[in-house]
Amino acid sequence: MKYHVWRLPIQCFNGYPDFPEEVFSLIPQVPIKPQEGDHIEMDQKMFPTASIGFIEKVEFPASGGILMFSHPMKVPTRGIIIPEALQAADVVKKYIKSWLSFFGGKMRYFLFPLFVVPQSLFNRIAWKWIEMTADFVESVVLHFAFNFPIVLKPKYLSPAVAELYRVGDSQFGYTREGKIIVTFLCLALENDRNYRYRVQDILGDIDGIEIKIHSRKEIARLVKLLMTRDRARGWSYLENVIKLVLWFRPQMTKMIVAFLWELDMMKIQLDAQDMYFCLNDAHYDYLGLSYEERQKKFETLKVGENGVVSESHATTEGDEQGDTKEKLS
């Protein structure tokens, strides 16, 4: 049996022509056959752009997105990792982290007046920063997309990222800068699954009533939840910036609430297919469970036909009695 690494038809910021709906124009690279029983690794000299193992096939569900079947995994992953996109995301993540450390570090005491200036002046300053960031993001993405575009069309994004793109594009995509930043954030989440699963986990914990009535308190709780559950990354700078925004820039708070309120949480929340890949992460307490509790939950996941994962719930003693009574009647 031959295994192929596939390149998908994708769309970049500068606007590529629309591809056929069926997306059959997949371009196979050099066919390769893994050694029986060996742990499969890509030969970086032969395949410098490959970093995710051997892809047996990809499927395009009617609901949208992409399912990637990799040898020897029995369960497909949602989305396909494009190494160049991951590299672009890594560059911009460092850029954003440097700004967060600047605004959320000790310098925030000197920058405090920036958050209490009149709204009109704050808007001009903020817009300049947004323009600068969008230009930087676009240059990075186009640099890594020199040989081919690296941004998936929205209908091929994984369900959670597609929903984030839908809401982000509707609220911020009316400007060039907003379109670029929203598209890049979705690019990063689509290719960096660790961040995507964390975002899904935190957003899936939103209290729909509290986000409307006590917006600042609920947003602060979500950030604190991220800090508590993620033991691999430090989020203190983000927490400091969010606090400044929540207390001194009510308009930005309203924008955050409007974005969160419009999300369809059924598409955002972690489901069994996502849990199969993230519950074993020892560095993040998904669903607020300890590592031992997540291991027990993982054991309840059942892999069915075509790699579909479902969660089986253990039958309790009360349920068994109820079933017995029903059979007797």
Image: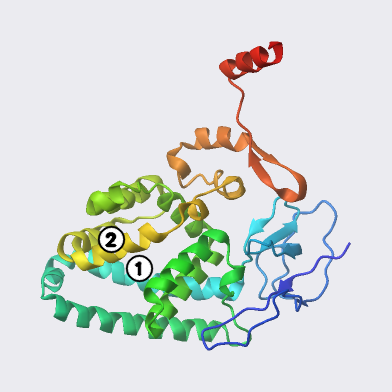
Give the residue pinned by disc 1: 97
Which residue is tagged 2?
A: 237
Image coords of residue 185 (percent x, y): 45, 70
* Residue found 67% across the figure and 76% down from its top: 48
- 237 w.r.t. 271: above or below: below
Label 1: element kind? helix
CB atoms of marks 2 and 1 within 8 Å:
yes
Give whichever of discs 2 and 1 has the lower sequence position.
Answer: 1
Q: Residue furthest front?
A: 329
Q: Identify residue type, mark 2.
A: Tyr
Q: Residues within 10 Å of mark 2 (few under 14, many from 20)?
A: many
Task: Tell me if I can see residue 16 in this picture.
Answer: yes
The residue located at (69%, 72%) in the rendering is 44
Q: Amino acid at mark 1?
A: Lys
Position of the N terminus, as image quadrant, is: bottom right
Depth check: give the residue in front, 99 or 224. 224
Q: Position of residue 283 (x, y in %)?
A: 47, 47
Near mark 1 (Cα within 10 A), the count class, few <14, some 14-19 or many ≥20, is some
Camera-nearest residue between 96 and 187: 187
